Image: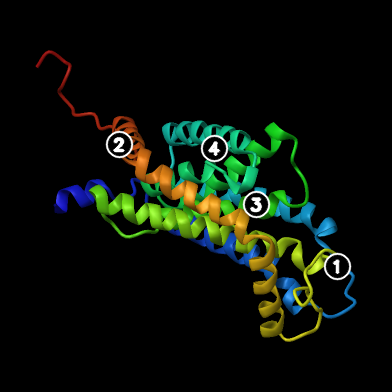
Amino acid sequence: MTGQLARHAPVLAVRWRAAATLGATTLVGLAAFLWPFLAQPGSGLAHGSDAPWLFVLLIALLTALVVAELSGGGLDAKTVAVLGVLAAAGGALRVLGGGTAGLEPMFFLLVLAGRVLGRGVGFVLGALAVLVGAFLTGGVGPWAPFQMIAAGWVGFGAGALPRASGRLERVMLAGYGLVAGLLYGVVMNLWFWPFLTSGAPAGAAFVPGDPVAANLSRYAAFYLATSLGWDLPRGVLTAVLVMVAGRPVLASLRRGTRRAAFGTTGQFVAGHGEGG
């Protein structure tokens, strides 16, 4: 069992440079989502103007993360190639789902790939899959960088789950997929909810300057009234796909990473191949 658990550990560890970059990216994401709760009334700020800067900063941080992994030996050409293929597949799945009734099969791939490839690659994959999907659908708007951050957290969380194998692993991943599908919606609503001028249910609108606890209570009412019906299908679909197709997909991803020999370096032994 110990050997099996070791084989089911993420194949790529996060080096300290990548960990620092991931930490910085997470802090930027938290600030982007939560700053309205701390803003002063009448500040006049809105995501329509800050989103382009957040997008540029996020791309810079993702680039820094990849460079840190490349320089630290965590990524090589094979890993980058696999990451590109998975990001393209994730973008295609996002187009396929289109968010209809909250059904987004992309999260199934993020959970499984993040589990196999680890936290750092899982974060980059989530962000890139959203970016690819946005370009394919022409849906690049002020919401895009927030979706990239939130999807990156989904992939990161999958890579941070404890070791397990067999059915226990699939049940754990299915439960995570269900929770992640809900939390993705909880987080994503924060990018626009504080700026709604109309459309919020009574008693569920953001009030600038009010205590954080009061605004969080209003947000909970807003989420239950408007978003739970969209987010629950996303989580349920992710969990069902993990249970139904998780075993072969996990096996394929792990078989591919073993064949690619991620994290290993070829060595030449003197005297071999010289006729001796």
Q: Earlier in the sequence, mark 2 or mark 4?
A: 4
Q: Which residue is mark 2?
A: 251
Q: Are marks 1 and 4 in contact (CB under 8 Å)?
A: no
Q: Earlier in the sequence, mark 1 or mark 3?
A: 1
Mark number for residue 147? 3
Q: Earlier in the sequence, mark 3 or mark 4?
A: 4
Indicate the position of residue 239 as horizontal and vertical percent values: 43, 50
Q: Residues within 10 Å of mark 4 (few under 14, many from 20)?
A: many
Q: Which amino acid, mark 3?
A: Gln
Mark 2–mark 1 Cα distance, whole angstroms, equals: 48 Å
Q: Is residue 73 visible?
A: no
The residue at 75%/35% (across/down) is 138
Q: Secondary structure at mark 4?
A: helix
Mark 3–mark 4 Cα distance, whole angstroms, equals: 13 Å
- Is 62 above or below relative to 270? below
Q: Residues within 10 Å of mark 1 (few under 14, many from 20)?
A: few
Mark 2–mark 4 Cα distance, whole angstroms, equals: 18 Å
Q: Which amino acid, mark 2?
A: Ala
Mark number for residue 90? 4
Q: Residue furthest top?
A: 275
Q: Secondary structure at mark 3?
A: helix
Q: Which residue is mark 1?
A: 45
The one nearer the camera, 227 or 137, is 227
Mark 1–mark 3 Cα distance, whole angstroms, equals: 20 Å
Indicate the position of residue 261 as horizontal and vertical percent values: 31, 34
